[in-house]
Every structure is written in C-alpha cells, then in structure tokens.
Amino acid sequence: MRVPALATDRYELTMVQAALAAGTADRECVFEVFGRRLPSGRRFGVVAGMSRVLEVLEGLRFDDADLEALRSGGVVDDRTCEWLARYRFDGDAVAYPDGEVHVPGSPLLQVRASFATGVVLETVVLSVLNHDCAVAGAAARMVVAAEDRPIVEMGSRRTHEHAAVDAARAAHLAGFTSTSNLEAGVRFGVPTAGTSAHAFVLLHDSEREAFAAQVAAQGPGTTLLVDTFDIAEGIRAAVEVAGTSLGGVRIDSGDLAVHARFARRLLDDLGATGTKVVVSGDLDEHGIARLSGAPVDVYGVGTSVVTGSGAPTAGLVYKLVEVDGRPVAKRSTGKATHAGAHRVVRRHRASGVATEEVLVAGGADVDERPGDRSPQVALLRRGQRTDDTADSVDLEAARRRLRERLSTTLPWDALSLSEGDAAFPTTYVGEA
Amino acid sequence: MRVPALATDRYELTMVQAALAAGTADRECVFEVFGRRLPSGRRFGVVAGMSRVLEVLEGLRFDDADLEALRSGGVVDDRTCEWLARYRFDGDAVAYPDGEVHVPGSPLLQVRASFATGVVLETVVLSVLNHDCAVAGAAARMVVAAEDRPIVEMGSRRTHEHAAVDAARAAHLAGFTSTSNLEAGVRFGVPTAGTSAHAFVLLHDSEREAFAAQVAAQGPGTTLLVDTFDIAEGIRAAVEVAGTSLGGVRIDSGDLAVHARFARRLLDDLGATGTKVVVSGDLDEHGIARLSGAPVDVYGVGTSVVTGSGAPTAGLVYKLVEVDGRPVAKRSTGKATHAGAHRVVRRHRASGVATEEVLVAGGADVDERPGDRSPQVALLRRGQRTDDTADSVDLEAARRRLRERLSTTLPWDALSLSEGDAAFPTTYVGEA
C-alpha cells in the first residue's frame, strides 16, 4: 500500500515551514518513540509494525496531488512545498525489531535526522506502531493463555477495513496460527482459514442440506458450524453428513466450556474422535484462560484482538530528545520526558531471564556484565538498509523472536494475566 | 480509496462457492445490519460511514490480481472466480442515513439481493460501519458535553493511518469543528487545524525564539503551545512575541481546569482578552464535562475519540433475516436474532421527541399515529441511486441531521453521560 503522505497532522508541516524560515529546520535531531507506561494491566509490550515503519521511512513521498492540495489549501508556503517535494529520509533509524518485547521507556524507534526530516514522520510512524503494537500486545497474552492450542484471528469485521489487514499480521506475529482475512494472506503470507456463518445454514431448507453443500464444496475436512438450532442435533447431523473424518465443529455462542465438553463427548460417542472442537464468540485472553480445562482444539478470536483487548492504542509517543548533540526535554507539569538519545542495555540472568532495561543517555558508561544484550538494531543508516534490516522486519523471524522472549526472556510472573509490575524495571543512566 | 475486495473473511467466498454448487446462491435474501445492544454506558448510537458503504456497494470489484490470488491460493474454485469477476451489486439497500441516531435492533442497513451477492458484502460493510459508528457515537457525546465550544479532532497518531482519515470524517459528522488530519481535509472537506508540538519549542534556543519563528510563519492569529517549561512564563513570552492579538495558547498537560483559569486571568491581565485558551491532553467526554465551568475556548481531543472512548467497535452484526420471503433466524442459545426484514416506524411526541422504535416484520400492520416517521431511506434500488441517496451520505446534511436529533429527537435523559436505558425502547411487531 502507498504510504499516505497527507494522513498526517497539519502541524507537522506548518512546523517545517516555520523552521525553514527560522533557519532551524536543518538542526540535527534525535526523536524517540516510547511509551510512558504500559496499558493498564499489562506487564510487557510487543513490537509490531516495524516492517511498516520501514516502508514509511523508505517510501514517504509527497506527490504532485499532495503538494497541490497543500498549496491550494493554504496549508504551507511554496518554499515548504518545494522542500516536501524533495523529501527522502536520509537519516539513521535504530529500532527494536518486530517481535521484541518492551517495557515503559523502551525506545522502540530512534530517528536521527534533520528536524524537518524527522518531524514529518511523527504522525504516521505513531499511527503504525500504536496500532500494530496494540494488537500484538493483546494477541501475545492470548497466545500465552491458549498454551499450545491454535488461535485463528477473525476480527476483520470489528475494525477499519484497512486496519484489519495489518491487525491480522500483528496477531500472527504474536503467535496466532491463521487469520480469516484474505488480504493478509496475499500481502503478508499469513495462513488463512474459515468455516461458515449462520447465514449459510439458514439459507438452506435444513441444517443437513447446508452441511451437505459445505462438505461437497470443501470436503469432509471442513469445519461445520453446529449451533444454529440445537448443538447436539447439529453435531449428529454434521457427523452423519460428513462422516467420522469430519475436520471440526464450531460453536459460536452460549457457555463455551459446557458446550465444548458435551460436544467432545458426543463426537467421541459418534466415533468422530479426530474431529476438532472449535470455539469462538467474544473470547479474550481471560475467556481463553477460563477454557484451559475444556476439550477445546482451536480458538477463534475476533473483536478483542483487533481492538487491543481494552487497549486499542499502544500509547506510544514520538519525542524530540536531542538537538545538535544537546539533550532536550519538556520540563513543565506532567508528560515529562527523559532528555537525550538512549542506548539500551538489557540485563539478563545466566538463565536468560531479563532483569533490567538500562537506558543510557549522553554516552555515559555502564559496567558491562555477562548477559548484557541490546534490543536495538540499526534499521537504516543514512537512509540505507543495514545487515540487520531484513531480519528485523521479517514476519517469521519476528514470530521466532517473540516465542523466544515469551519462553526464556520474560520472567514467569510477566506472563500472568493479572495486574502487576512491568516484566523488568527501567533504569535511566547519565540523564541530563 | 479503492475498496479492498480481499479485505474480507475467507468464509464469505467459500460460502459463495458452496452455495453456487448447491444451487442456493441465487435465493433472494435480506440481510440486516444492527447492534444487539449499545456499547456499555451509551444511550444512543450515531450512524456514520454510510457514505463509505455506498462506495462499497457501487465499487466492489474483484480484479485480475484478486482472482489470481484466490485461484493460486486454492481459496475458491474456477466457477466461483468467474462469478466474482462479474460481481456488481444489483440489489436494494435501505439505510439509516449518516447522522441518524439508532438504538438496539435498529436496522442501520438492509440489503436485499441474492445470497451470494449479499454475503460477499458482510465483512467489509461491517468493518466500515463498526469503525465509523464507533467514532461518531463517542464524538457525539463529547459534542454534547462541550455544549457550544468547538472541539478539534487530533487523534490520528493513536489509530491506524487509514482509519485516522475516516475517523476524522466521523468526528466532524458528529459535530467536531475540525481535524488535524490533512488527508481528511483533502478527501472530505473537513476543516483542518493545528498548533505546534513541544518538539518545535525544544528545537529552538529559547521558547521565545520558537514562538517568534511560529508567529513569523503563521501570523499572530496562531495558537502557541505554552506548557513546555513553565506555563505562566510561556504565556508572558507568547504575548510579548505575538502581541495582544495572539490567536490562542494551548495547554497540553497538567490539571487543565486549574491551568485554564490561571491562563485566562493572566492573558486578561496582559491585555490579551481575545486570546483563546485551547486545552488538550487525554480528554474524553467526561473530562470535557468536568471543564464546563473552566474558561476554555477550544478542546483538542485525540485518543478517546478515534478509539470510540471505551467502545472501539460499534458491535454491529450483519445477519440473514429472510430467504425467498421466509423469515429466518438463529435459534439456539445466545445471539438469537429477530427473523424477517424490518420496516421501522419511529414514534414521536408532538414535541418531536422520539418515544419508540417499532420494528415491523413480515408486512404486519401497525396503527398509524401522528408523529410517526421512518428513519429508513432507499440508498440503492436494483443497484441504482434514488432521490434520497445523495442527501443520505452528504457530510453537511449528516451534520445537520444529527444536530437536529440531538436538540429535538432525543429525550434530554439520553444526553446524560451516565449509564442508563436506551434513548427510546425498541418494539418488535409481527415477528415470525
């Protein structure tokens, strides 16, 4: 998808105009993307969308139609339009790769460029990261709650049609098995899956005819939706029509724990011992956890994952932290920031469990310890990709990275669904 | 923007395949879009996005790349691809126009078409309406809370970059004065506005130099951000630099009620009696209401409006209610629906206040009363626009419509921000 150059805040461009006129537009600046806190109840965040940030950094262009709209709308002056027409990101970008975990203050992205070059990115970079990280952060908790059972993302209808595609990718990054969203399959290679809707059953003269039509088209390995009229009768009809090699039955309403147990027993009684029980319907991480003892084979999750399960935006901000080598920060009441560009040292125990996120400003020294690693990688250097770029934004690499973080890096407590402290504390060193 | 044909759920297309093979794809069906309940705490919903639904109905096409992806991915068979290649919506669509209010059960959209034609629309139509109605529903409450004070939408950075553009439109539809999002200005004619960021102040050697740069570029009518270091000093510097004709000062942090009062007093003392006080920073409808006694001239609202203020999706569903004239409905536990296509009669008192939403199924009769009106209009008839189409999706018409509903149609109680019943009850008549 083309990066929408004008899907930005008006003030980003008027600030460019004022800075160009004042002679300050070219000052070398560092901006950092971070969250002041995690969403309520969360103990860690998950980085997602860095692949799309890379597209923004490499692809943002103001075309003739954009510039004409800015001119005719009186948004900025000719000089600024000329500057925007030549826009190419030529700075450095240091990032946490997709699939990395983060805590409050973690600089997910650090942009070093002229003020004007960097400020133009603010709105769109935040839109991308606030959306994708919100989905991935929620999805990761669901994946933890589901233990080894697969989860299908099916929330496209509950979010903006373009957001849905990126939400499907972010959920898959976090460990969801597949998505209902076909465009996410085409664009990102996320496996797609689907069953059928109550409408399909109701269309036909009987549930049995509907099942026969679906099995004829999809084969007996398909998953039949059995809760349109009566679940037990639905299951009997499903097995009669498809045979005991029926792939699955889906239950989309009612008390899923109760229904899953009865469904499993009935399927087994009918000889369909390999038929999977798929459940969906207003599930979130807590609903999934409550089903951990039920004979569920596959979860379908919609609304809660695409809306970040209570935290629809990751709360990330994009702040100027350094100007011409001088650390800067807002100083008045509230929303204070930590001045200076930060190098991050993540401390780990010998077991690999992370213990501290150390943010080092102003070239200060910190003692080196075994187990120190930095989550930061160079995404772009003077606008060019580095050896780390491809791996940082690759979907499969991100999935592996997060799996490793969930199994090894995060302390066990951090996987709890209940309220609690961040997975590990953030410490600032050498602050101005 | 092109309607993304594959931003849909896989099962919509596999159901088409199965129905084509079973000979049921051409059965005449009615689907209805409605909410089973309003989001928690809400007393009414606001229709938004019908203009985009119209674009979907008129513009949905499966192009060669889409079809090739479906074929090569093994999603559907050749026959289905051929059917999709010819896709044109040729049915009827009856809608609640943009800016109309709705309650539980209200059929915001009714699609009458062949099963296959109608089912293909489900995911994308819901994506559009669930997003836009969520934003407009939240925005309307903020507009009510703000009374006659203007609100600027500035939430683009807190939502997906494409959703942001439509969120800006939905907020404006609900009564927001303007948006920070430039693309919404270009695409929909929403007025755009902006001030500047803390970064702009920090870029310069002093706050005063930053203010001078902004005033030089934007004129003294601009709004200066005064809370980077010390608000009182910031205001003094702002008036010194811009003069007493300074357009506004923005305060983006701290206790906004306290700061607004001190800012107003100081501005008046400095002779800047016409300078506006603009406040922003985590405001939602409740925060706005709490500031009703403070000398605030303009509110800036971001996160809460674009994320639906606690209800990021409107919870609308798209359900099959009629097949070949026969009313149908899911019958098992939970998620039950009311069978049959519904004609809506909204009852009103002589004063114009609505008292009841009557949903009439199956051609049943209801007594006619003075004050009866129907919120439903014909959006498309056999795929063609009607005399009502343009007005139903026009942004200015929608703004007027909602203003009228908020001032006249809704009972006063419905404007309360606290929990309570829906604005008026829903009654089903002639249900199958």
Image (cartoon, coloured by chain):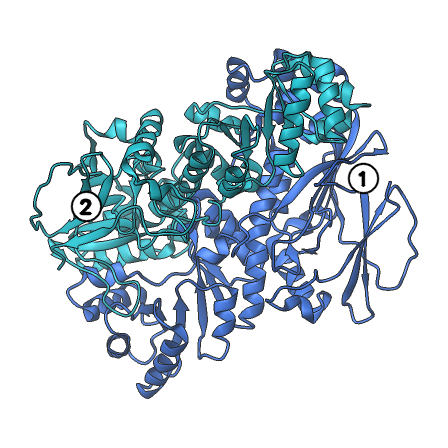
Chain colours: A cyan, B blue
Q: Position of residue B379 (x, y in %)?
A: 72, 43
Q: Residue at x 92, y 49 (%)?
A: B365
Q: Amino acid at mark 1?
A: Ala
| A319 vs A277, nearest the viewer | A277
The answer to whether residue A203 is left or right of residue A41 is right
Q: Position of residue A33 (x, y in %)?
A: 28, 48
The answer to whether residue B143 is left or right of residue B302 is right
Whether residue B318 is situated above or below residue B367 in the rendered picture: above
The answer to whether residue B375 is left or right of residue B211 is right
| B356 vs B152, nearest the viewer | B356
Q: Residue at x 22, y 58 (%)?
A: A19
Label 1 resides on the chain identified as B
Count of numbered circles on the image: 2
Q: Position of residue B428 (x, y in %)?
A: 83, 50
Q: Residues within 10 Å of mark 2 (few under 14, many from 20)?
A: many
Q: Position of residue B208 (x, y in %)?
A: 20, 71
State which mark lies toward you, 2 or 1. Answer: 1
- Residue A179 seen from this side: yes
Q: Which residue is mark 1?
A: B339
Which element carries disc 1, helix, strand or loop? loop
Q: Which residue is mark 2?
A: A112
Label 2 resides on the chain identified as A
Q: Quadrant of the C terminus of chain B?
A: top right
